Amino acid sequence: QVQLVESGGGLVQAGDSLRLSCIFSGRTFSNYAMAWFRQAPGKERDFVAHINSPGGRTNYADSVKDRFTISRDNAKNTLYLQMNSLKPEDTAVYYCAAASWPIPSTNKASYVAWGQGTQVTVSS
């Protein structure tokens, strides 16, 4: 089955940048649409960004548009999230997710595999 492992989180100051990575294994990565979601304490897990299979089409939540960039390297089986101009409200656990078909969705119910999450904390 699909396995996902995120990395790259940490503690940063407002205005800083981070790049999250998610390594995919178990199936053919290029066949799967992928996404990033995030969950702040006491809140629902929310959509951040998605990318289609094999890549080239992306979509973002309004709150991160023009600051975050999702990308994928199918040769390395890796999904990325470049996060710039970070804000305290970006503080959350970030999860990567794999859909069971090439067309992505903002609905987390569409995703069949999830990573364990990586913590991002942005101080003001």
Image (cartoon, helix red, strand yellow):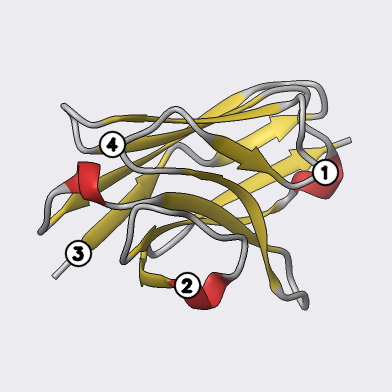
Image position, residue 117 (x, y; %) = 46, 59
Q: Tell which circle, 2 or 1, labels the residue nearer the N-terminal end.
A: 1
Circles 4 and 1, Cβ within 8 Å, touching? The answer is no
Q: Looking at the image, tell me whether mark 2 or mark 3 is earlier in sequence order.
A: 3
Q: Which of the two labelled residues, at mark 2 and mark 4, occupies the earlier sequence position?
A: 4
Q: Position of residue 69 (x, y in %)?
A: 59, 28
* Dot placed on the residue nearer the N-terminal end, 1 or 3: 3
Residue at 34% in and 43% down: 53
Q: On residue 62, which mark appears? A: 1
Would residue 87 appear left or right of 1 to someone viewing this image? Answer: right
Q: Is residue 105 above or below residue 70?
A: below
Query: Along the line of sight, which residue is nearer the eye, 88 or 48?
Result: 48
Q: CA distance from mark 3 to mark 4?
A: 13 Å
Which residue is pictured at 41% across the width and 50% down the height? 34
In primary-sequence order, the first of circles 4 and 1 is: 1
Residue underneath mark 3: 2
The residue carrying mark 4 is: 78
Foreground mark, 2 or 3?
2
Question: Which residue, given by chain and number where applicable, does mark 2 sit on?
Answer: 110
2 and 4 marks in contact (CB < 8 Å): no
Q: Secondary structure at mark 4?
A: strand
Q: Amino acid at mark 1?
A: Asp
User: Disc 3 or 4, which lies upstream in sequence?
Assistant: 3
